[in-house]
Image (tube, helix red, strand yellow):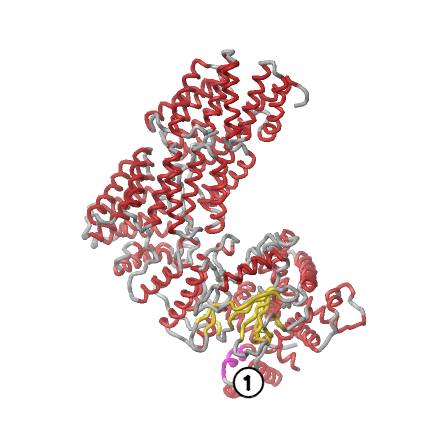
Amino acid sequence: MPELDHIAEHFQRLCGLSEELQRVEVERLDLQDADHALLVRLLAADRRDGDPVQQAINEGALALAPRASTRVGAWQLRRELGSGGMGTVFLAERIDGNFDQRVAIKLLRGFPTSDSIRRLRQERQILAELDHPHIARLLDGGETADGQPWLAMEFVDGLPLLDHLRLQPTRLRDRLQLFDAMLDAVEHAHQHLIVHRDLKPANVLVTPDGVVKLLDFGIARLIETGEQGQRSTSTRIFSRGYASPEQKAGATITTASDIYSLGVMLRELLTGQRKADAESPAAIEALKIDAELAGIIAKATEMKPGDRYSSASEFRDDLDRYRQGRPIRAAATTRSYRIRKFIGRHRLGVAASVVALAIGTAFVWRLDRERERALHAESTAQRALAASEQDAASARASLEFLTDALTAAAPDVAMSRQVGVRDLLDAARRKLEARSAVDGSFTQRLQRLLATLYAQLGETRIARDLMRAGLEGIAPADSADALRLADDYEEYSSILGLVEDGAGSLAAAQTAAGWREQFAPEDDVLRVRSLQTLGMVSHRGGKDEEAIDLIRKAYRLGFDKSIADVDSSIESAQLLASLLATRGDCEEALKVADGGLALAKAKLPSDAPSNLPLMRARASALNACGRPTDAEPVLREAIAMQERVVAAGGSRMMSLTNDLAVTLNDLGRYQEAAEMLSRSDKAMNEVGLGKLDEAVSWTNRAGILENAGDYTGSLGAIDNAINLLDADHIAADHQVRRRIERSRARTLGLIGQREEAWNELSRLRELCRSIEGEESGEFAMLTWQLASLASRAKDPARGLPLLEESERLWSALVPPSHPVFAHAQRARAEFAVLRHAYGEADLALAKAVSALEQGAASPVDLAIARAELAGLRVREHRPLEARQLLGQSMPVLRKALLPAEVNRARAERLAGELGGGI
Amino acid sequence: MAESSEHDVTRLINRWRAGEEDARVTLMDLVYSRVRAIAGQSLRHTPAATLSATELAHEALMRMLGGDAPWENRKHFFNVVAQATRQVLVDAARKRSAGKRGGNVDRVDIAAALNVSGGKDDATLLQLDSALTELGRSNPRQVKMIELVYFGGLDRCEVAASLGVSEGTVDRDLRLAKAWLRTALES
């Protein structure tokens, strides 16, 4: 039995020394003979090259699978270079005698089907296009006689990155230069839409001349391609420690995933540690990194892909900036980020009801739920820098201040992630209060910074007070200062909007706009941004007309001046299209959304996430036009794109799946709609939404339940929604509350509480008249709901005038093909039957059936109309036709609707009367 | 889904983590037969493919636990799979060496499928196996490390995380263990 413990310590100490020194040192030790001999033997064994353990095991494994051939394509395999998760790599030379060319041949495993081989060939074509001095080229590829795929790559005779650094201790500048080359290579690949997926130091070789070469670009993807058909769980290939959170979570991988891995590698190649808080001894000489470099790394390794550098070149720009001593941008809040944040916060135009004609939804794109963000010391540093991105000295002061505060907050765990952000902010606030007003402008700057942070935590009231104090008596010193303050005012506007201070929010937005106008009158991008902000304030205040005017101006400005900032123009298009769709101007909404999509197509890559809000706006417009059949594929495409390009969950997915649920509901596919809504709820839970959005989701659920005939369930869901609104103190005239109350009234009407339903709908209609006006979609909807209720109550005296009015209102809003007109004909027929005017009723129902047959509307609606026509045929003593119509309807109704659903119940009674097993 | 029993494997791992030793034994049996099956299967599908010990381990992980298993589970799994892989390779070598003497019939199908005779390589592998067993009596942690690195395919940081020691300790222990194994193999 080996007594290793006796000598382990000596071995550790001596194994790094030269042979000669070892001998001297060993003799000086006071060891027993056996231990002495063992130590000498071990040190000698340690000095020898090679790895007999590995060799023995490899040969054992090889014996399991004897190699049939050492020739692959035009190449002769020479020796094994290594093996890993994806296969085995060999050094190879050309068979035809061109011995100058050596390549690394990778034999890939796990490509069992011809389909996967075909996909592999396609991918190989794409990879072959990568031609960059810092990327090892793909030279050749094919399949062996046994069908095993192989790739021939440029052979790089170099050392892995960390080994290189171990052997050649270098300074910061040199290491950053190596990293620069890596960024170059990654940028090149990303421009070809190739994501590496497995970036790690072992995949970066440095040649003796110091040239950096990245290996295995896209190989991980190749392997996954090959295995797709084989298993439905993708065998993700990545290296723990470098893989991004989304990669580890099995979510969609994008170029941002490579950025993350690069960030980890940057930290490791500078500090020898992959994590900021790691403590193990570094394998390479560790350099100290300052707050700015830490900020850059933190930005690259943000948890959310969208928060990282958007490209390798942006990453490099910031490093360049750092090297030149200019302030870095790691924390700069970009314009579009601000706008999105603003919109997100204000939960604009949340999806409306799921009445048969959902007026459509609007534009809640809460990209980020800031409160979720795991803030730690580094991102705090970034935010401190953001306080005055132009002024590095001041930023450092902020940083020191926050660091002090952090230490004060929790001295034991300072600089660890465990400090609650809230603790940190509270400590910072107390410290700020205690600070004497030596430097008033510094204090106020900090207050504004803290206000922003509190707002991100959802602590809007504290945020408001801090921002108010931070802006009090402030006058801009120069134009640059004024523009920065304008940003703060915009933030203030957003905070005030959140605490329901509409007037204050408007005033702040106007101040921001005013200063921009005064100090940067030529800057159209800023003007567009101001208009968008003002438009959002109006929308939030319930003044959609004003909002539309403002956003329309922003939209036109973007086009007239052909502003180069595509994002800004797309933002305008999306906001305008959504607002128009919400109002019911479906044709114009469609035109604007398509205009935006055309612009995106011309200026952005086809997979650009900016397309998503536009696609969603287009779908809303199509739904508003009564074209759910056309809306469905648009939403499905958007969902697929979101999954592919961005992420499988999150707020966007919530909105998109919610919209799709509404659309499916319109198509009468209640089962699918309910499933889709569950998916939306799942995304919603992940995002952690506010009460308002939750209420909307409950209402949508209620609508689907109601359509299927579960009235009790529907009312329960609506009550949940209303409770949430109450808990959130949503005012009576709030658009969302009114729509939810409209849904409730409709359900009450269906279960026979007609008087209450009538009063409620009438009240809402009057409220709508004064808020949105008579030309709004909501007014038309309420009028139609009243007419529909009257028809169910068999009250033509009240119903007919309302019916005619609603038809008139709708024709100004939607095209004649809209299904609402078919439903109006159904109501007309009801009234005619009450007057025994069967001829008129017949005509109206025939119109309804034919419109529903032609339109691509819900098959359930068509079945209902046919069943109604069947009822009429019975009265007309034409039982054969009745039977035929009912025979068409019943299977559809029975499949989609519960027995208690009013229309099905009625049709079932008729079927019973007719008999004959319908 | 991973091929089968992904759920079972996860459950077994959880039970093992909760301290149930018999769960570990069951898991070990499961993994052993799976690793053996993978070795046999990959031969039938792609006769020219080499499947190294590391690949076997990863393949087993993917099939039994799925690619996205949480690290805690992977960690435990790799512990088992590393041992199982060692077992499979050693059993196969033993079988090849045993030649036509029969014996150990229930665990021979790989060797039978391979139809390879035992040679010098097998002897080395068997020698390594007994050296590891010997070392394990006094230095179990070092043996665990060797298994994780060579049979499980873990890198030094994963080994460190898996055993709850620092990477420096892993480097030191491995270096010593490798030196000792080398002396044992060359003796």
Say which quarter of the image contains residue A494: top left
Q: Is residue A291 placed above or below A7 in the rendered structure? A: above
* Residue A282, image quadrant: bottom left
Q: Residue at x 45, y 41 (%)?
A: A655
The residue closer to the viewer here, A187 or B18, is: A187
Q: Residue at x 31, y 57 (%)?
A: A385
**Label 1: which residue?**
A30
Q: Is residue B53 visible?
A: yes
Residue lying farthest to the top in this orientation = A836
In depth, the one of B111 and B136 nearer the eye is: B111
Q: Main secondary structure of the magenta part?
A: helix
Magenta region, residue range: A9-17
The quarter of the rendered structure image containing the C terminus of chain B is bottom right
Q: Can the viewer see residue A276?
A: no
Asked whether A579 or B52 is in front, the reply is A579
Name the chain under label 1.
Answer: A
Left-right relation of A862 to A600 = right
Q: Is residue B88 above or below residue B5?
A: below
On the image, the x and y values in percent for residue A229 come to: 61, 54
- Rendering quarter of residue B164: bottom right
Q: Residue A386 location, x and y as percent?
A: 31, 55
Q: Is residue A518 above or below residue A776?
A: below
Instruction: Find residue A521 and report its horizontal and vertical position in percent.
Output: 21, 48
Q: Amino acid at mark 1?
A: Asp
Q: Magenta stretch containing residue A10, yes or no?
A: yes
Secondary structure found at label 1 = loop
The image shows residue A689 at horizontal and vertical percentages of 43, 41
**Residue A694 magenta-highlighted:** no
How packed is label 1: few (under 14 Cα within 10 Å), some, or many (20 or more)?
few
Q: Nearer the viewer, residue A592 or A156?
A: A592
